[in-house]
Image: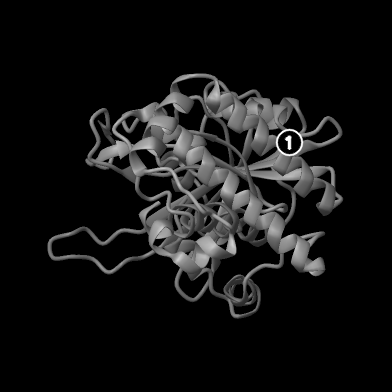
Amino acid sequence: MRMIHMDKGLRSLLHLDTLPSTDAAGDWLRCTGEGAGLAGLDRVNRRIVAQRLRKLERRTHTLDIDATQIVAEKRDAAWTYKGERGYMPMVEHLAEAGVVIHDDFRAGNVAPASANLDFVKACQARLPKDHTLTSVRADSASYQADLFNYCEETGKTFAIGGKLDAPTLAAIAAIPDSAWTQYADCAVAETVHSMEHTHKAFRLIVVRYHHQVELLEEDRPHYHVIASNRTGSTADVLIWYRQRGEHSENGIKELKIGFGMERMPCGQESANAAFFRIGVIAHNLFVLFIVAHDPKSCRKPAPSPSHHSRLLQSRNLGSLSDFKRGSF
């Protein structure tokens, strides 16, 4: 707000003769967050998403979900699992559309694994009636039997980062040496796995790599695992899963850094929830602006050049190092 006040050229261009003070803006955010304002902002965002989907001309969508930490030394900020005070909002992207369909601004002490199935259902409910979610991608916080069962029962494809618990490590240990495909800096294999409460078994794709050991550290392989019911080759599933880094992780970075959501203005969580949702709306409006001025992006956003190079490296040069560096 102070920057806009100081930018006379921008104010003249946008015909902003008067602007509210920062105190007035803070009061408005507090009123909006405590009342029915959040629901109203949600309705605004749903209309923006619907507009984007009409331009996209597709009815099936991939959902990428992730939590992100916002560090904030605020009055009611709680300690996160990373040991810092702040908030831990959930952000859900529609991968093909490039928009945030839903957000849930949560206290910092709420685990990223909390209520993920409810978030997926909430995203489905926010789609227009003739649209549906057909795929779900997430990190290991969503490694939950109820989410897997829901995807199977509703015909959704999923690829979700796994957890290296005792049953998973036992399944990895049972993979024969002949089943591993060697690459330049890692090896890949897969097996069939299940959890106690899953109704169906799923593919467990394992990336094994060696890291440079520290002094007195045991030299042993490290693993990344992905649980999936997607058909196709192991490499294809890995590549498809890693695309969430482009759509979700980088999308969250753009939301936080590009639209000012890495810092919260108020001491109250509800007010900051309103501020964050306004940031989501601004992000989605910007996507609509891009689509309106670039007809080629109307049907499907083009992957970045770095994304193309990663795919070529993985498929043609025999290296899956980008999976090693990525988060699962």
In the rendered image, the residue lying farthest to the left is: 216
- x, y (%) of residue 93? 61, 46
The local crowd at label 1, few if under 14, some if 14 to 19, many if 20 or more residues have their Cα within 10 Å, is: some
- x, y (%) of residue 55? 83, 53
In the rendered image, the residue lying farthest to the bottom is: 317
Quadrant for residue 122, please give it. Answer: top right
Q: Residue at x 54, y 60 (%)?
A: 188
| Residue 64 appears left or right of 290 | left
Q: Secondary structure at mark 1?
A: loop
Q: Residue at x 53, y 69 (%)?
A: 320
| Residue 108 appears left or right of 118 | left
Quadrant for residue 268, please give it. Answer: top left
Q: Is residue 290 above or below residue 113?
A: below
Q: Nearer the viewer, residue 92 or 12?
A: 12
Q: Nearer the viewer, residue 111 or 320?
A: 111
Q: Nearer the viewer, residue 34 or 316?
A: 34
> Label 1 is placed on what type of residue?
Lys
Mark 1 — residue?
A: 156
**Circle count:** 1
